[in-house]
Amino acid sequence: MRNRIFKLAPAALMSLAAVSFTAVPALAQASAKASAQATAAPKAGRTPDGHPDLQGVYDIATMTPLERLPRDPAFLTKEQAEKLQKAEMARRNSDGGSIPDDAKPATSFFEILERAGGGDVGGYNRLWLNQGSSFTVVDGQIRTSIVTDPPDGHVPPYNAAAKKRRANAYGALPTSDQAEDSGKQDVTVAVSRGEYDNPEQRPLSERCLLGFGSTSGPPALPDYFYNDLHQIVQTPDTVVILTEMIHDARIVRMNAQHLPKEIRRWMGDSVGRWDGDTLVIDTTNFTDKTRFRGSTENLHVVERISRMDDKTLLYRFTVDDPQTWDRSWTGEMTWPATNKPILEYACHEGNYALGDVMRGARVQEGAQPAAKSTTRN
């Protein structure tokens, strides 16, 4: 969140007629030096090795949800988008910084999220939020979902293998894309599923391991609340993608081989290459503790990042895991550049909140003996 304590072309050849023989070697050296400098100097918008310069800080906050909302068209007209954007800004300005309770039906996607996040009681008022104010636009199309394939704008349904996993204890385990919530879920169900039995059952972002809502990636998605800044640092051998939310830094090894399968990482093993002017990042070797949207450690994500103009990147990703979905799915969005600084997100797993969550759960169990988990350590 933005308020938390939580950046010489080669000279034309001169006529040799007026140059003495003794000056020829000096001229040749100077010409060679100038040519070398011109070769080493990066072209506009490119790094010294000739590839597009993707470096900068980008704010990916957007009003476009990952999946298309019911009854929404695939694209909005300019007039429709402007109307929705103005209405959302008016809603945010009308509450005086407070987030209303659940007395009235939610009128927008963001209002639903705010209520799920706890509102003013147990959550945030608007002082802490830095939400998107416009829809993402790609190829002149104002998108109503980040997911572009399947064409309906929805992540494919779980296949039989995934449904079977989710039916057992695996379904109670936290995932890397879990968003912030208010804890308003049915406590009886949560306790019976063991979600408060020990710290390892709590969401990865709550434990300060990965950012909320898959902000850390891959794929890197908007949080829709705050801390949506990403910074790219680029060298010929390495690309680093620094995420503001929970200070994740993903290392992309360029032109390398993937690590052996037995070596697993929270954000996977990312290997990059250039496909023309597009940076392609191939990520495998996920840990079985990440489980993006319920996937397995065999998750495979391919990201493609390219420049749309000098202030905007196009970010495209494809997600594949045959043990979770019967087909791959793809999304894309813009990454607009920003002058905002990335702020520190001072989050660590040993903070007071996590201990208080566990102690609070024990108190709730004592008040509801019938719901007490029999598996708690």
Image (tube, helix red, strand yellow):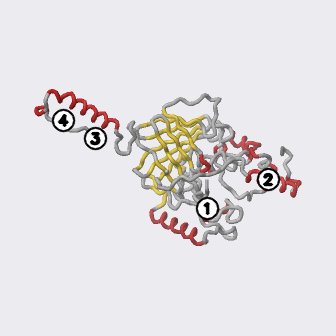
Q: Quarter of the image containing the C terminus?
A: top right
Residue 28 relative to residue 361: left or right: left
**Given this view, does label 2 or label 4 mark the residue nearer the observer?**
4
Q: Residue at x 74, y 57 (%)?
A: 185
Q: Which mark is residue 128?
A: 1
* Of residues 315 and 1, the one drawn nearer to the viewer in this rendering: 1
Within the image, what quadrant is residue 223 found in? bottom right
- The percent position of residue 91, horizontal first and vertical second, equals 57, 69
Is any part of residue 151 visible from this angle?
no
Report the amino acid beneath label 2.
Answer: Val
Q: Earlier in the sequence, mark 3 or mark 4?
A: 3
Judged from the image, the secondary structure of the residue bearing numbered disc 1 is helix
Crowd class of label 3 (few under 14; some 14 to 19; many from 20; radius 10 Å)? few
Question: For the residues marked 1 and 3, what is the alpha-carbon distance in whole angstroms?
Answer: 49 Å
Whether the residues at callouts 2 and 1 have beta carbons within 8 Å, the answer is: no
Report the amino acid beneath label 3.
Answer: Leu
Q: Residue at x 61, y 40 (%)?
A: 267
Q: Which residue is mark 2?
A: 189
Q: Earlier in the sequence, mark 2 or mark 4?
A: 4
Report the amino acid beneath label 4.
Answer: Leu
- The percent position of residue 24, horizontal first and vertical second, equals 18, 28
Q: Which mark is residue 13?
A: 4
Q: Which mark is residue 8?
A: 3
Q: Earlier in the sequence, mark 2 or mark 3?
A: 3
Q: Earlier in the sequence, mark 1 or mark 4?
A: 4
